[in-house]
Image (tube, rainbow, N blue to C red):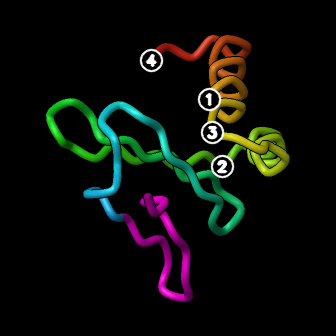
Amino acid sequence: MVYPLSIDENGIKMKPENMEKEKMYYCIHNDKVILVYKDDQEFLNCYEVEEKDLVESVKTCSSPDEIETIIENYIQKENIKH
């Protein structure tokens, strides 16, 4: 299956038809981590993360699971409510 997010000269391209529900997808664009997932009602949820330390950590990840762990740890560390 083709990864549902790609980047070109015009920005980020999304293919929701290639997304599984409740699974997070990511890409890095303009020094931001872009997080996207399709919820169980088929709505796309998109987030931009600009926190430099977090972006740098994500750049070194080799899998989406690692990214989720990094983000969850950041949320706990910063005591962010979700």
Q: Quadrant of the C terminus?
A: top left
Marks 2 and 3, the one that precedes in the sequence: 2
Mark 2 and mark 3 in contact? Answer it, CB < 8 Å.
no
- Mark 2 crowd level (few <14, some 14–19, many ≥20, 10 Å Cα): few
Q: Which residue is mark 1?
A: 68
Q: Give the residue type at disc 3.
A: Pro
Where is residue 80? Give x, y as percent.
Answer: 57, 17
Give me the C-alpha separation between circle 1 and circle 3.
Answer: 6 Å
Give me the C-alpha separation between circle 4 and circle 2.
Answer: 17 Å
Which label belongs to residue 82? 4
Marks 2 and 1, the one that precedes in the sequence: 2
The correct choice, above or below, for 53 with respect to 14 in the image is: above
Q: Nearer the viewer, residue 46 or 15?
A: 15
| Magenta-drawn stretch contains 3 | yes
Give me the C-alpha separation between circle 3 and circle 4.
Answer: 20 Å
| Farthest front residue in view | 1
Q: Nearer the viewer, mark 4 or mark 1?
A: 1
Secondary-structure class at tag 4: loop
Where is residue 45? Give x, y as percent.
Answer: 33, 43
Marks 4 and 2, the one that precedes in the sequence: 2
Mark 1 and mark 3 in contact? Answer it, CB < 8 Å.
yes
Q: Give the residue type at disc 4.
A: His
> What residue is drawn where x is 49% and y is 59%?
3
